Amino acid sequence: MLDRSVRAAYSKISVKSQTVLPAEVRERLAVGPGDRLRYVLTEEGVRIEKAPPEGDDPFVTFTEWAGSADDEDYAHL
C-alpha cells in the first residue's frame, strides 16, 4: 500500500559532488542562499536540517563535541 504522507524529491550529484535542492525541499526547510545545512547520520539514513547560523550555535566553539555520536546524542535537545 502506498503511504500518501511520504513524498519524495530528487536531484543529481555533479562531478564536483554538488547538488541543487529541489524547490519543495528548500521551502520545507525554509532555506535560501547563505543558509547552512546539517546532515544527521542515523541508522535509518540521513536527515537534512536547517542549521543555525554559526554565531547562533553556542556549541560551535566546542570542537571536542563535533562528532557524529554527539550529534545523535544531543539531537533531541
Image (cartoon, grey):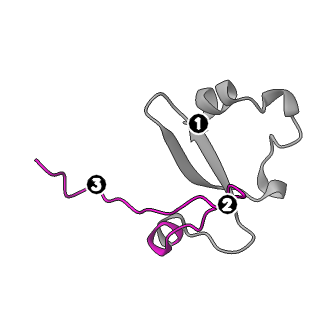
Q: Which mark is residue 50?
A: none
Does 17 appear above or below 24? above
Read off the residue under disc 1.
Answer: 75
> Quadrant of residue 77 in the image?
top right
**Residue count near mark 2 (Cα–Cα under 10 Å), binned few <14, some 14–19, many ≥20:** few
Percent across and percent down for residue 31 are 61, 69
Percent across and percent down for residue 34 are 75, 70
Disc 2, disc 1: CB below 8 Å?
Answer: no
The residue type indicated by label 3 comes to: Val
Q: Residue at x 47, y 37 (%)?
A: 45
Read off the residue under disc 2.
Answer: 18
**Alpha carbons under labels 1 and 3: distance apart:** 22 Å
Magenta stretch: dominant secondary structure: loop
Q: Viewer-nearest of labels 1 and 3?
A: 3
Q: Nearer the viewer, residue 33 or 12?
A: 12
Percent across and percent down for residue 35 are 71, 66
Does 5 appear above or below 23? above
Does 12 appear above or below 62? below
Q: Which residues are magenta?
A: 1-26
The mark that comes first in sequence, 3 or 2, is 3
**Residue count near mark 1 (Cα–Cα under 10 Å), binned few <14, some 14–19, many ≥20:** few
**Alpha carbons under labels 3 and 2: distance apart:** 25 Å
The residue type indicated by label 2 comes to: Gln
Q: Residue at x 67, y 30 (%)?
A: 68
Q: Which mark is residue 6?
A: 3
